Image (cartoon, helix red, strand yellow):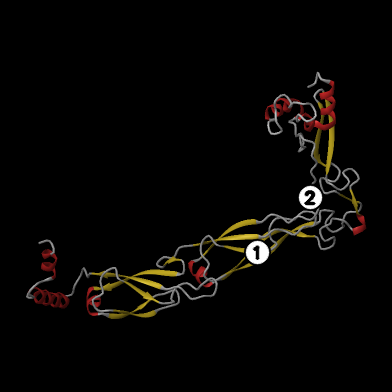
């Protein structure tokens, strides 16, 4: 292509677009617009790549957004107690925040008339440079060195913030933790994220909650699980017990003949609904405990009970063995 004056002139005028075959009758050495990786590797040793400083190898022009831009969000994690997660709480902590300057409203200028369009980039925030080489003219694009990409020049900086448009301050933040929140869920604090640019608003602060475990209660969603001990006599004859819940003690009936592992439900004694709906339940798993030490009177009564059981036509043990016959 370089040895052909017409092809070289077409390249100097149209760049690679002039080599698509419509100008020359054939492609550029067999390469298509999407196949410049090899050329880029060769040229990168001379010019830092065909794109150069963010430039486009096809001569297209891009512009920086010099208007107000919202800041990024921030994420922090917070541990809270089991009961605080169930019923809600509030936490207060210190946080460094970049607040928009109250005097210049984020512009960085003492007065609106002190803001001028950058004469170097014409307000685009970018500058385009051309470099003529043995391979042709290469165009590169980069951030304007005079306005640092903002597209604006400030003649007189704001006296309050020194032209930054913001002030970093330490704030005492109070966040409300709603009742029923669970591990992994987040609370949003508006406007306490990363600083916006060009007078744009700050992002938000997201607090991810981690609920610490309880010594006895276990939680699954809105439901609470608790294992309760019941004596063999109470399980056989039935009784009532005062069961601990997150809402306080609640009287619950143990039906006669309750078996080990039976689950008894206390309706709406679980965790409040995060959206204000019905509370969860508390599910109590019965664990029948056998006394290891008996008084002489208790031993006497159990002995009488055992004799009475053995005099029955078919004992519990015999019923079990007969299942294998």
Look at the picture and state if 117 lies above or below 291: above
Q: Position of residue 173 (x, y in %)?
A: 66, 65
State the residue at coordinates (67%, 60%): 204
Residue at image position (81%, 20%) is: 4
* Disc number for residue 228: none
- Asked if 36 appears above or below 300 in the picture, the reply is above
| Mark 2 vs mark 1, CA separation in Å | 27 Å
Task: Please tell me in which quadrant of the rendered image residue 280 appears.
Answer: bottom left
Q: Return the residue at label 2.
A: 65
**In this orientation, which residue lies closer to the viewer: 170 or 89?**
89
Q: Quadrant of the N terminus?
A: top right
The quarter holding residue 288 reads: bottom left
- Left or right: 264 as drawn, with respect to 73: left
In the image, residue 153 lies at what x, y percent? 88, 49
Please say if the residues under marks 2 and 1 sit with CB atoms less than 8 Å apart.
no
Q: Earlier in the sequence, mark 2 or mark 1?
A: 2
Quarter placement of the C terminus: bottom left
Q: Secondary structure at mark 1?
A: strand
Quarter holding residue 232? bottom left
Figure check: 296 above or below 201: below
Q: Label 2: how many residues lie within 10 Å, few (<14), some (14-19) or many (20+)?
A: some
The residue tagged 1 is: 189
The one nearer the camera, 151 or 55, is 55
Residue drawn 28% across the image and 73% down it: 230
Residue 235 image offset from top left, x and y in percent: 25, 75
Instruction: Say above or below: 241 vs 128.
Output: below
């Amino acid at each position: 292509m370089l040895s052909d004056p017409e092809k070289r002139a077409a390249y100097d005028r149209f760049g690679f677009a002039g080599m698509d075959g419509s100008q020359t009758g054939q492609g550029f050495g067999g390469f298509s617009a999407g196949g410049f990786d090899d050329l880029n590797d060769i040229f990168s040793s001379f010019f830092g790549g065909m794109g150069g400083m963010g430039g486009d190898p096809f001569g297209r022009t891009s512009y920086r957004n010099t208007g107000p831009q919202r800041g990024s969000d921030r994420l922090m994690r917070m541990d809270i107690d089991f009961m605080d997660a169930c019923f809600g709480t509030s936490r207060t902590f210190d946080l460094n925040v970049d607040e928009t300057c109250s005097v210049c409203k984020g512009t960085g200028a003492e007065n609106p008339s002190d803001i001028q369009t950058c004469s170097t980039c014409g307000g685009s925030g970018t500058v385009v440079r051309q470099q003529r080489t043995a391979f042709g003219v290469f165009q590169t694009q980069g951030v304007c060195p005079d306005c640092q990409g903002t597209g604006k020049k400030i003649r007189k900086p704001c006296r309050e913030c020194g032209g930054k448009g913001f002030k970093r301050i330490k704030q005492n933040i109070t966040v409300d933790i709603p009742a029923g929140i669970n591990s992994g869920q987040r609370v949003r604090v508006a406007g306490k994220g990363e600083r916006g640019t060009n007078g744009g608003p700050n992002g938000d602060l997201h607090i991810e909650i981690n609920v610490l475990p309880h010594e006895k209660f276990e939680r699954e969603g809105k439901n609470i699980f608790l294992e309760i001990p019941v004596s063999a006599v109470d399980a056989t004859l039935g009784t009532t017990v005062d069961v601990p819940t997150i809402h306080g003690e609640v009287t619950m009936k143990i039906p006669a003949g309750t078996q080990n592992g039976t689950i008894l439900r206390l309706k709406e004694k679980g965790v409040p609904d995060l959206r204000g709906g019905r509370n969860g339940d508390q599910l109590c798993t019965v664990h029948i405990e056998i006394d290891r030490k008996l008084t002489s009177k208790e031993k006497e009564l159990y002995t009488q009970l055992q004799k009475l059981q053995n005099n029955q036509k078919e004992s519990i043990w015999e019923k079990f063995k007969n299942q294998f016959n």
